[in-house]
Each structure stands twice: as C-alpha cells, then as structure tokens.
Image (tube, helix red, strand yellow):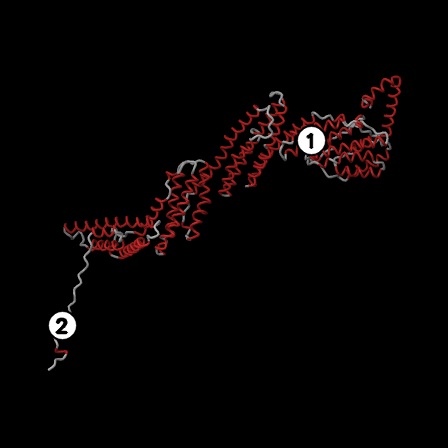
Amino acid sequence: MSQGPEDQPVQEEVVEEVKPREPLSVLEILQLVKKRDLFLADTHILELEQECNAAEPEDVAGPTVKDGGRRKAKDVELLYEELQKELWAVVRESLRAPTAGPNLGLVVQVLQQEEEADKAWALSEAAAPGGPRPRHLKQRWREAVEEAADSSLPQRAEFTAGELDKYLDRLRARVVEDLGAAKRNVVSIYPEDFQGFQVYVESYHQAVARRLKVITDNQLEITDIYSLLDWLYNIYSRDVLGTVCITSPFNRSQLSPLLPAETVDRLELDCLNSVRAKVTTELSQVLEDEEKRWMETLHVEEYHITLAKTVIQRLQVDLERSASINRSLGSRVAQCSLNGLADFLYRYAFQRKVEMFHEGMQSGMFGDNDDGYVSKTIAMVNCCPPFRGFVQRCAQCDPSVSEDSLRRANKSLDHIVQQGVRLLVAIVFLQLFFERLVKRKWLTNVEPYDQIEAAIKEDFKKYRRMDNPPYELLVAEVHRRVVMEYLRSIMRGRIICTSMKMRKRMAGRLRDEGRQIKALFKDLESPSSWLDSALSHISELIQLEDIPSIQMEVGVLVREFPDVRTKHVSAILNIRGMTRQAERQEILNIVKDIESDGGPGPLSRDRALFAEVPVTSEVHCLNVGLSRIALTASSCVSALRPRRRKTRTSTQENPDDAL
C-alpha cells in the first residue's frame, strides 16, 4: 500500500544562524585609516562612538565599567584625530594630482556620513549640552582648504623691500595656478551643495588678504605702495579673479576687501605725502645745485639746462603711476604735483633765482661774461615750455580745483619768459642805430640799414636756440621794434621832398628796405607778418600823385593799423611836401572819419605799432610852415654865400648837417 504525501515524514528545515559581525578593534580601524580606506574606517569609528553613547550611565555603572567607557571614548577621539589627518592630507594632495579622484571621493563620502551623524545626534536625546557631537567635519574641511591655500602661497619672508611688485607677481601666478588645478582635478568630485570652487576661491582670497595685512603693518617704500595699490585696484581683479572666472564662474560678492578701507586710505595719503616731500626737499636741492652751476659755468655757452627735465621726471613718476592705478588717485596726485610745482616756480623759488641771476649780471658782480649771460638767459627761458606743458597736464585732471595753482604757475613762467625776452631785445637794440635812417645821406647810402640787418642776423645765430613758443615772442618783439624804430625815423621829418623825383627815390628806398625787413623776419620765422605792410603803405602815400588814390591808401593804412592817428598821416604828408591845406584836409578827414566811427577799440600791445611812434616834426599849417622854412633856408644861404667855397665841401661830406 502506497503512502500519500501526508504520510511521509516531515524533514525539519535547518536555518543557519548568522552571527553578528564582530566590531573591529581600535588597531584595525587605525590600519584602515592608514591605508586610506577612509569611508570604512569612519563607519567603524561611528560604531565605536555609538557603543560609547549606548554604554550604561556612569552614575549607575561600576568602576570597571566607567574606566572602560572612558577608554573607549578616548579611543574614539584619537581615531577621529588620525582620520582627520588623512582626510586633510588627501585634500592637500588632490589639488595637484589628476588621479586623486578615488581618495577624494572617499573624503566626500566621509564628510556626508559625518554630516548625517551630526543631524541624527541633534534629533536624538543626546542633544543635551556637553555631548561629544557634532563633529562639524564639513566646516573643518573648509578650514583644511584654507590651510592648504595658506601653505601653498609665497610666504611674507620672501618679500624684499623695494621689490613688492615681484612678490605680488609670484602671488598672482600661484593663485591662478592653484585655482586652475582645483578646477581640473577636484571641483567635479565635490557635490554641488559643497560649492567646491567657491570654497577654494574664498580660501585663496583670505590667504592673500592675510599676507597683505602683514605687509602693510610696516612702513612701505613709495615704489612698493604704488605696486600694492595697482595690485589692489587693477591686477588682482583683472589678472587673478578675472582669469579664474573665465573657466569657472563664482560669486565675487562673497569676497571681502583684501585690505580695510582705512589701510588703503593711508597708502594713498602716503603717495600724496611723497609728492609734497619731493617738492620741499628734493626739488629745492635740485634748484640749489643748478643755481650753483650757473655761477660756475658763466663762461660756457649752453642753451639748454637739465633743470626742467629733472624736476618733471621726478614728479612724473608719481603722476603716471597714480594715474595708472585709478582716476581718483591720479587726480589727487596731479593736484598735489601742481600745487607743489606752482610753489617751486613762484616768487621764492625758480622765478626768484632767475631774477637774482639777472640782477647780479646787470650789476657786474659776475664780471664780463656777455656770451655766457645770453646763453644762460636763453637756457632759463627754455625751461618754461616744458614746465608749462607739465602744469597744464596736471591741471587737466581736475580743472575745477586747479585754477589758482595753474594761475600762479603760469604767472611765474610768464614773468621768466618776458624778463628774458625783454633783456635779449635790449641787447639787440644796443647795437642798432636807427637815427642814421631816413636822412638825406640815407637816400643814396644802403649802409645804415645793412648794418642793422647784419647785427640782427648775428644775434639771432644765438637767439634761434630758444625754444617755441618763447622764441616766437622774442622774434615778434624784435620785428615790431625794428618796424617801430624805422617809423620813428620817418616821423622825425628830417627829409621833406621837394620834387616828384625825390619822392620816387624816397618811396623806392622805403619800399626796398620794407621788403628786406619782411624777408629778414620771414627767414627768422616771425609770426608778426601783419607788420610788413606798414612801410609799403607809407611809400605809396609818398609816391602817389592824385588825391583820391592817396585817400584810398590812407583808408587802407588806418584799417590795417587802427592806432594810426591824424598826426602820423600829417607827418607823412609833410615828408611828401604837400603844401596845399585844402588837399591835406581832404586826406586827413579820412582818418577823422574812421576815428569818429569808434574804430576797433583798444588794442593789445602785440598789435600796437603807431601808438608808440611819436611825431616830432608835425607842421600844423603847412603853407605858413613851409614859407617859414623857405625863408629860413634862404637866410641861411645868404649868410653862407661869402663862405660858399668853404662850406660846400663840408655840406657834401655831411649833407644831413645842413638840414
């Protein structure tokens, strides 16, 4: 009889009991740490920590239990110390190790696991004050990154005074290099909530700030101050943060200033004080040395001195460096430079030294050194154009606050130029004898004018060494004075034409010498070509025959030279021998009509000519005047007739004496 399934014996299922995993010993956990099996090691440390927390409270435990609990707690702390050493070592090493991903990944796992443990502890009953948690390993990771950044950057001891720019350049290169490595090797391993790149940027930023603080705790040389300010305002933002941001954007707003505002203000004030010190000490000494050299080299012809170049170069260093940093500092340094230079140039500095030099030369206290005096005068004037250009450049930075200093500086420079020009013009005219012009002998003798022209050309061999624009002022003044002195010779009325032939001869001489004067000063590059037509107009007034043509020429003369007066035209009519009062009046009325219209108003001195030309032989009533001249001449001839043979020879030798 067969058996059914229910009749078969039941076999008992044997379930193998799984024994609980034995906890690792402290030594075994430590070996895991050393092997950098960091996540597993942290897991066992957490288990050991839980055993400590789950142990019987000390107030009910026996002495043996208490000692064991303390030992386990101490083991946990020691294991965490060793774990953190390896964690942060991996963080440091991974920056420059492209294959460090696995180990760094374990670090991230540990940090996440520990963060969860901190949260769990906060929710547990063990959250009472004084508990062993939280560990805050994520915060300590940030600190580890900061320490790594600080140890990587060049140390303060590598900075040498006067070479801060080199130190800052090494700092820049290292920050850019390390942050680039962080982007390539480690940032992608951190989860997004870690903000890995932001942490690295902030860590390096803080490390840089600590170095700069130490550096600025001591007094810096001015070159180092400019280097540091340029780095703060420009280089760091552009060449460090700007370069890094190209590949990995980050939040700049979370970066604090590298230096406190009061420290930066102090550095900028040091720049201004440096400029003031240069003016009050360095530049004053430069001027003293230059003045001494003037006295020692009076016998040497030199037309340029280095004073202006030296002064400008020393101030320009501050001007250029500050302007390259930022506009605000550049403006303040420019204003300070302008104020200092205005003081340097004004009454008690350069201007006064120049005045004392001229006073000494004119009093003869330096002996006979005319050539050296002329060249030194030109050299001093040649300092003014570069000085003027520099003060103008400084003033442009902030015109609203520069007006007074610019005015003082320009006033001093104007004084030096005008004094030099005035003295050089006086030297020229000491050699020129205009009283020999426009006499009877002059009609047939070109020597008086030729001597004047030769003397001017000789002087201008030196004078042309003067730079523009003072040279233009000098040659324009000599040009004006030559024409003016020529006109004075004409207005003395020492020649009265008695025939058409004589008028043509005189007009021809005036025209020829007028052309020569024009050619002379054109060659000397005079800017005052407006003077050239004066003599040609006068020559036309002497030569023209009909009244309408003379009236027209007078009108042209007065319009071109608004300071021509009736007395000047009257004197010219005397010279041409116009004897009819009615004709004279018709011509003079042209001048009166223009004068009655008000004319062009007051003229500046550089456009005045006839105003400084006196008339010394004006005849108010020509008919009576000429009659008296004729009677006087007749009486003289009668008186001289008995001695005719004797006086003729004398008159031929010097016909001017017979007038």
Q: Is residue 114 above or below residue 282?
A: below
Q: Position of residue 74 (x, y in %)?
A: 21, 49
Tell me which corner region of the image, top left, top right, bottom left or bottom right, holds residue 126: bottom left
Image quadrant for the C terminus?
top right
311 sits left or right of 181 in the view: right
Q: Rounded to the nearest whole Å, what is the CA distance between mark 1 and mark 2?
A: 141 Å
471 sits left or right of 598 in the view: left
Q: Which mark is residue 11?
A: 2
Can residue 610 be seen here? The reply is no
Can residue 631 be seen here? The reply is yes
Q: Residues within 10 Å of mark 1 (few under 14, many from 20)?
A: many
Residue drawn at x 63%, y 35% is: 468
170 sits left or right of 76 in the view: right
* Label 2 secondary element: loop
In the foreground, 619 or 644:
644
Q: Position of residue 388 (x, y in %)?
A: 59, 35
Q: Which residue is mark 1?
A: 478
Q: Position of residue 478 (x, y in %)?
A: 69, 31
Q: Position of residue 280 (x, y in %)?
A: 51, 31
In the foreground, 61 or 34:
34
Furthest-left residue in this view: 1
The type of residue carrying mark 1 is Val
Residue drawn at x 46%, y 36% is: 222
